[in-house]
Image: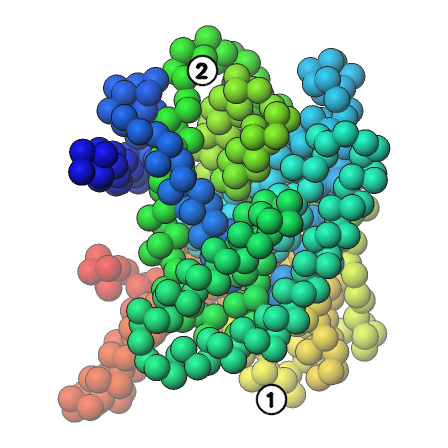
Amino acid sequence: MASELVFTTDLMLVLGAAATGGYIVSRLGQPVLLGYLGSGLVIGPLGLNLIRDTANIQELAEIGVAFLLFALGVQFSLEELNRVRNIALQGSLLQIGITTGLVTTILLSFGWVDALAQGIFWGALLSLSSTAVALKTLTERGETNTRHGQIMLAILIAQDLALGLMLAVVPAINQPGPLWQVVGFVLLKVTSFLVAAVLVGRFAIPVVIRQIALTESNELFLLTLIALCLSVAIVTARLGLSIEIGAFVAGLMIAEVDYADQALGKVLPLRDTFASLFFVSIGMLIDPEVLIQNLGKILSLVSLVMVGKALVILPIVLLFGYSLKTAVLTSCGINQIGEFSFVLAVVGLENELITQETYLLLLGTTAITLVLTPTSLQLAEPLIHWVHQQPQLMSFLRKLESSQQSLEEGAIANHVVVAGYGRVGGVVVELLHRQNHPVLVLENSEAAVQSLRRQRIPFVMGDADAELILARANLTTAKALVIALPDPMSTRLLLKRARAIAPKLDIIARAHTTKELDQLSQLGAQEVVQPEFEAALALCTHLLATLGQIDDQLGMTMAKIRADHYQAVRRNI
């Protein structure tokens, strides 16, 4: 009875500390997992020593890792990966391979590791970036649907997929025998397991899940998911693979089932609860003295990692034909070490690929890179502007900003240029095309270009704010320019360059925030449209007409609000 009370007390302390630490760092605008790490340090053996039986917490933490990887597998989306599949798959493979190769070479050259296996492990570990932190940063900046946002998320999804393979290979690379034979045997074992899992996932799992769902019992549905996750994890452990790869594969088996979204909704609370135990348990291993004594080394590692990964990612994005701006933003957004590196680090520690002290240095380095991610992305814009002010450097970089498609219908004049063929730009192009107005689209999405090609609408493929793309748009002979880009920075840059090329051109721009209304107007846009305000005006127009407002008076009122850039209604929002 006493031992049960000790366990219950320890569990209460861990969860309470995680909630408190997570709340504090969240209020400071930082990732909550840093709060979990900090709370683990405070209550752990090297802190206040409040936890008396860490072994039980460690066992629960392993379940947390299993749920973490299970949810990752369920969330895996081939559709999202397919949007920018070339850079997602080939680019990620290049990024992981180059990072691993460089890290291994550097560590072996300076004698910082004793064996090739250790260098490869470090390279794999540092090649991973943080999906959670990058997505949070993009969301806060309103850039999830931008070109660089899509590329970042695609690379991160591919990295998450590669994590499953890393978790299978890492325990084997330190085994005796030629490395290629050991890894080859593990890959053969993983492939055989995946084939069996795909067959079961395709034919058996949907039937079982469907029958459980027909009971309309939430309890049975959740229990089935937990049993599937843990059972597949145990099978992989019996095969000599890690439980993490088993949990990930179990998630993949659910991902293609009709009830995948429902399954994810049920598992997420469990994942978040047990995952917090995992990160707290990591925090318990942190020795503050080691971190303080090695602070200079940690800060040096942070600089090397963030600058080094950015320099690896930058040319890869350029290699796939994207602009310098997109490449810089992408490289500055995913140059941190990811939260799943913690999972890989634990496996490496268990297999003696890293020492305890090295593990602690890694924890400190990872935590700092996660904190600095938003700042790194903020520094991208000044860096891009500085590069554009260097004539010699820009003359070289312009060769990389090449249009991937040219006009299909020869020269064009007296036309309307539409930058962006998304939800807004697509409607504009459709209406202009129906009215037989000449239109030219600037777009960098292959899927959008395919649609334009089918409709025989002239286009130039590439980033709309690139100088070479604008040179092909014939702005000096155009009647108007409509900027419907999802990226605020691209919108401003395009507006500046277009105004410099054609000072008298009628430019209509889409603003994403109230602040942008004034910025774009000052940069020379004749008309700036803010979607939220326009939606409100449309609702009010219908409402006031219903209440008996005269159409002429109503039209004049709305026109005055638009002419004044919504000043009359801004103070109320």
Mark 2 residue type:
Leu
Label 2 SS: helix
Q: Of residues 541 and 92, which is closer to you in this image? A: 92
Could you tell which of marks 2 and 1 lies nearer the N-terminus?
A: 2
Does residue 265 lie above or below 240 as drawn?
below
x 57%, y 41%: residue: 129
Judge the density around disc 2: few (<14), some (14-19), many (≥20) Cα neighbours within 10 Å. Answer: some
Count of number-bearing discs: 2
Q: Quadrant of residue 79?
A: bottom right
Q: What kind of residue is marked 1?
A: Gln
Q: How is the image coloured?
A: rainbow
Residue 559 x %, y %: 33, 75
**Of residues 104 and 490, which is closer to you in this image?**
104
Above-or-below relation of 165 to 41: below
Residue visible at 77% across and 52% down?
188
Residue for badge 2: 291
Which quadrant of the view contains residue 305?
top right
> For the residues marked 2 and 1, what is the alpha-carbon distance in whole angstroms?
67 Å
Location of residue 255 in the rendering, given as x and y in whole percent from the top left corner: 54, 67
Secondary structure category for the residue under label 1: loop
Q: Is residue 466 left or right of residue 131?
A: right
Relative image position of residue 343 (x, y in whole percent): 52, 39
Q: In the rendered view, does 35 fall on the left or right side of 249?
A: left
Identify the image quadrant of the N terminus: top left
Q: Residues within 10 Å of mark 1 (few under 14, many from 20)?
A: few
Residue 42 seen by the camera:
no
Q: Which mark is residue 435?
A: 1
In the rendering, which numbered label is found on residue 146?
none
> At 69% across and 26% down in the image, what residue appears?
118
Front-lying residue, 219 or 287:
219
The quarter of the picture where residue 301 lies is top right
